Image (cartoon, helix red, strand yellow):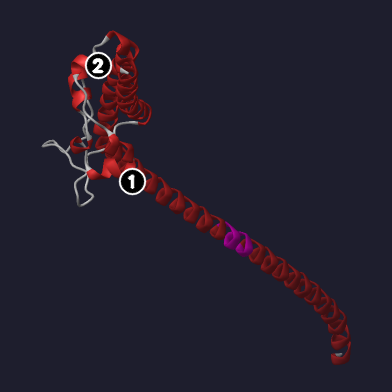
Amino acid sequence: MTEHISERYVAEVRKKIADKVELLRKWKAHGVPPLIDDAGKQLTDENNKPLYDYFPDDKRAFCAWTAKDNCSATIAKYPEILEFATLSRSTLGKKYHAKSLEDVETQIEGVIKKVAAQASKDNLKPELQSMRKELDYWKQIAIEANNDLVHQRRLAARAQTEWRRSELAREHNNNLLNDQIARLTTANAELTAQLAKIRPLSSKGKK
């Protein structure tokens, strides 16, 4: 009977450990959730850097970890935290929990590295946002400059079209003028010839 109870107890402890390890595994893969107050606002430190919700960073903290350590937003997203229960460090250190202890240490180390990477990335966000704003500014300047260039090109094309029309009109008017001069020259020559014929006759009549 004692052996049966002992096996059941060991199984219960392993499940307690496994449940916590599984959540740490998720956080190692996807990141530790942010620390959010009851109003839904993400909390930051005195340097305006984001804070992350509680996670155990050693074996002692792992054994003591329960839902009271996490914010309501995290619990809402990971309701399995409500089932977390404490266990003694001496129990975790038993030989028959050696594999579980190894998993605990591996996942804790992974989460610590993950949250460090998150912090590094989040700390860069303000700088990246500033760079994006500056980039957007220069993009807008480039767009405006391009629009102005397009406008200037349109004006130049319009001016060139008007100049061509003016040249064609001038050439047309020159042609008309030359034709008129030619006609007048011809008419003048004909008139001169007729006058030349009339003058001798006029002279004879006077005699």
Q: Position of residue 156 (x, y in %)?
A: 52, 55
- 164 magenta-colored: yes
Q: Is residue 172 left or right of residue 70?
A: right
Highlighted range, magenta = 160-166
Tell me if mark 2 has few (under 14), some (14-19) or many (20+) residues whose alpha carbon lies within 10 angstroms of its own: many
Q: Which residue is mark 1?
A: 137
What's the distance in space between the residues labelled 1 and 2, CA to CA? 57 Å
Q: Secondary structure at mark 1?
A: helix
Name the quadrant containing residue 174.
Answer: bottom right
Q: Secondary structure at mark 2?
A: helix
| Vertical arrangement, residue 116 with respect to residue 142, above or below | above
> Which residue lies most toward the top here?
95
Name the quadrant containing residue 2.
Answer: top left
Q: Is residue 46 visible?
A: yes
Q: Position of residue 151 (x, y in %)?
A: 48, 56
Residue 92 disc label: 2
Quarter of the figure that contains the C terminus: bottom right
Name the residue type under label 2. Leu
Q: What count of labels does the image hold?
A: 2
> Which residue lies most toward the bottom here?
206
Tell me if mark 1 has few (under 14), some (14-19) or many (20+) residues whose alpha carbon lies within 10 angstroms of its own: few
